[in-house]
Image (cartoon, rainbow, N blue to C red):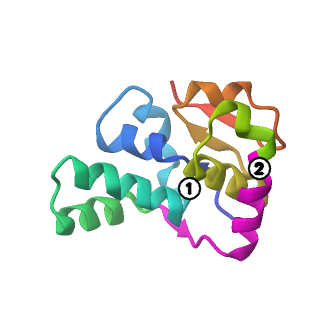
């Protein structure tokens, strides 16, 4: 089983060589992320003008296992809405948290606000 779940902010920290990347890089071979969060990363890279082929290459080189966003995860994500609505979490945020909860694995993020959440999942800040 993989050791940690990555939020899009954690992956983008690595790809953009941002603070916190040094905490994420050693975990990449044992990390997972949701297809929803993969879409977030791809969107940011595409917005920055990176060519599609290059995006595929850099994502593949990270070696992160991508977990499909299936019906059970969709329900879990939706059920997180009431507990997180005061925090303004996006669908992608909740999808990441739902995956961490489902797998019983910590979630890594750069989003400091997540540290205030009272959920049944470990949240580790990368910076």
State yes or no: residue 71 in magenta. Answer: yes
Element type where label 2 sits in the image: loop
In the depicted view, which residue is nearer to us: 3 or 47? 47
Q: What's the residue at 38%, 53% (across, down)?
A: 41
Give the distance between the C-alpha atoms of the residues marked 2 and 1, in whole angstroms. 22 Å
In the depicted view, which residue is nearer to us: 45 or 30? 45
Residue 13 to residue 38: above or below:
above
Residue 90 x/y as whole percent: 58, 45
Q: Total label count?
A: 2
Q: What's the residue at 52%, 67% (across, down)?
A: 66
| Magenta-tinted stretch | 64-81
Looking at the image, residue 43 sits to the left or right of residue 11; the answer is left
Q: What's the residue at 80%, 40% (across, down)?
A: 83
Look at mark 2 in the image and give the residue it sits on. 80
N-terminal of the two: label 2 or label 1? 1
The answer to whether residue 103 shows anywhere in this view is no
In the depicted view, which residue is nearer to us: 49 or 4? 49
Task: Please identify the quarter of the rendering in which residue 50 is found.
Answer: bottom left
Residue 13 to residue 34: above or below:
above
Looking at the image, residue 30 sits to the left or right of residue 62; the answer is right
State yes or no: residue 30 in magenta. Answer: no
Which-is-in-front pick, marks 2 and 1?
A: 2
Look at mark 1 in the image and give the residue it sits on. 31
The answer to whether residue 67 shows anywhere in this view is yes
Residue 10 x/y as whole percent: 47, 41
């Amino acid at each position: 089983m993989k050791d940690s779940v990555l939020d899009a902010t954690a992956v983008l920290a690595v790809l953009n060589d941002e603070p916190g990347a040094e905490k994420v890089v050693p975990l990449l071979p044992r990390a997972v992320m949701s297809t929803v969060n993969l879409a977030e990363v791809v969107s940011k890279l595409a917005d920055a003008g990176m060519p599609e082929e290059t995006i595929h290459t850099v994502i593949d080189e990270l070696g992160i296992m991508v977990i499909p966003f299936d019906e059970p995860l969709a329900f879990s994500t939706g059920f997180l809405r009431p507990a997180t609505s005061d925090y303004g979490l996006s669908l992608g945020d909740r999808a990441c948290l739902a995956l961490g909860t489902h797998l019983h694995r910590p979630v890594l993020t750069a989003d400091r606000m997540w540290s205030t959440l009272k959920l049944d999942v470990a949240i580790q800040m990368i910076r």
